[in-house]
Amino acid sequence: MMDFNDLGADGMDERIESFERMLASGESFFYDNDELGLIIDYYIDFEEISKANKAIAYAESIYPFETYYKIKKAEVYMAERNVNGAIKLLEKYKSIEPENSEIAKLLGDCYSITMQLKRAVDSYLFALNKDPQNDELLLRLARVNFALGNHSKAHNYINGFPKDYIYDELSVQEFIRLYMDYSQYTEAIFFLEKVINQDPYNYSAWYFRGLVHQRNEEYTEAIDAYEYCIAIDDDNTMGHLGKGNCLMEKSEYENAITSFQLSLDSDESDAEVYCNIAECYENMKDDNGAHFYYQKSISTNPNLSDAYFGLAMVNKRREKWNEAKRNLLKAIDIDRYESMYHIEIAELYLIDKNAQKCYEHYTYAYEIDPETTEILLDFAHAKFELDEVEEAVDLLLEHLENHDEDHRMYYRLAAYLFTLGTYEKGYNFLHAGLRIKPEEYILLYEFAPFTETVDSISNIIDLYSK
C-alpha cells in the first residue's frame, strides 16, 4: 500500500475533494486499490466514520471479492468502539482466508482491547510467523506479555528488534509509553542509553530520559537529561517545561519560572504553564505575582479549573471571600469531580454561617472521595462550629465503620462527647483512640481544650502514655 506521504498533503486533499464530488454527482469513476485504501484510511484517521463507510461501500461495489475492504470495515468498527462487531467480522473472514496475517494482527488488537490477552498473543504470533521482521508486531507482543506479567518474554520481544534499527521520535515515544505503563523505569533508562549510544544527538531520547527520571522522582538526573535535550534543540519547548517542573519539585522556584517562560508556545497550552508559574510565585509567598499569572492563564484558556482554584486561594488569603467564592464556583462548574474545590468552598460558606451550602459541598466532597478521613473530620467540625455538636457526633458515628482504623475519629468523637457532657461515652472513644495511637492524645485538647484540666481524663491518658 501507498501512504499519505507518497501523495503529499496537497495531493491527498485534492483526491478527497475529487472523490466526494464523484459521490455527490452520482457518477462512477475508476480507482485502484491503493487510491481507495488511502481515501478510507484518511477518513478513519480523521474519525469521519460515515464517509469511511461510504468509501468502503463504493470500493466493494468495484471490487466485490476483495477481502481488504472487509478488513477496513473492521477498522471502522474499531474506530466506532464496536470491538465485538470487529471481532465477529474478522473471525468470519479468517475462516475464509486463514493465512491472512493482516486479519490476525487486527484480531490481536481487538483481543488486546477486550483484555482477551492469551488470544491476542496467539493472533500476534501467527502474524509474526508470516512476517518475522515486523516491528509493530514485536512491540504489540511485548505490551501484551507485560500485561500478562510475563516480563522476561516481553523483554525478549523488545530485544528482537534489529541492532541497526533506527529509533525515530515516534518509535522512542512508543517504547517509553510501554515501559512507563508497566513501571519499568530501570529498563526504560537502559533502552534510552542504547538509543543515545547509537545517536547521541537524538533529542527525543534525552527528553524521554528526563521524563523517566522525573516520573521516578529523580529530579537532579531528570534536569541533566532535559538540559542535554535543550542543548541539542533549544526550540524544544517540552525540554524547558520538563526542566521547569523538576526545578519546581526541588523548590528552586525562580529557576523554574525561567524554564517555564522558555517553554511558552504561544498557544492554548501556555495556560497550564502560566498556572505553574503562578504556583511558583505562591510558594515564594508572592501573591501579586501568583494573581497576575493565574489571570494570564485564564485569559489564555478560560476552561482551566486549576487556574480558577489557584486564583481563589490567593483571594482567600487576601480575605476577599466573594471573589474567592466566585472563582471556586467557576472551577467546580468546569470540574465538579475535584473534591478539593468543594472542600474549599465549604470552608468559605462556613465563614458566612451558610450551613446549607457548607454541608452540601462537604457532602459532594465526601461522595467523590469517601476514603479520605480528613473530609469527614472537616465536615463534622463545620457542624461543631455551627453549634450542631450532636449532629457532628452522629455524622462521625454514621461513617465510623469505614474509618475504624483512624485514631483521629476516636479522639474527635471523644472531644465532641465531652463537650456535650456525655462523659461515659466519651471515655470509651478516648480509650479507643489511645489504644491505636497514644502519642496523639493532644488531638483531644485541640478540639476540647477544657479537658486538659479534667483529672479523670488525664488519668486515662496517663494509663497509655507511661
Image: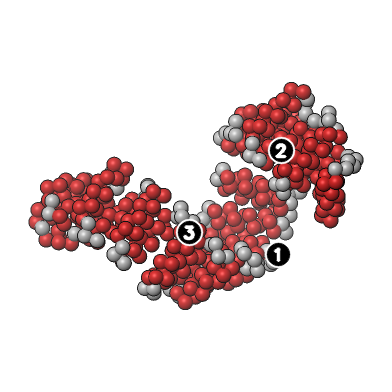
Position above or below: 307 against 397: below
Position of the N terminus by quadrant: top right
Task: Identify the residue at horizontal 79%, vertical 41% (top origin).
Answer: 55
Which amino acid type is shown beneath numbered disc 3? Asp
Query: Are the residues at dot 1 and dot 2 in contact (C-beta closer than 8 Å)?
Result: no
Q: Position of residue 52 (x, y in %)?
A: 75, 42
| Farthest front residue in view | 25
Q: Position of residue 431 (x, y in %)?
A: 18, 47
Q: Which residue is mark 1?
A: 233
Q: Which residue is mark 2?
A: 75
Which amino acid type is shown beneath numbered disc 1? Asp
Give the spatial CA distance, label 3 vs label 1. 40 Å
Mark 1 or mark 2: whose residue is earlier in sequence: 2
Task: Identify the residue at horizontal 39%, vertical 73% (top origin).
Answer: 320
Q: Which residue is mark 3?
A: 333
- Assess disc 2: are there few (<14), some (14-19) or many (≥20) residues with their C-alpha within 10 Å of its C-alpha: many
- Assess disc 3: are there few (<14), some (14-19) or many (≥20) residues with their C-alpha within 10 Å of its C-alpha: few
Horizontal relation, residue 73 to residue 26: left or right = left
Q: Nearer the viewer, residue 356 or 231?
A: 356
Which amino acid type is shown beneath numbered disc 2? Glu
Mark 3 or mark 1: whose residue is earlier in sequence: 1
**Mark nearer the viewer, 3 or 2:** 3
Residue 341 is at least partly visible in this image: yes
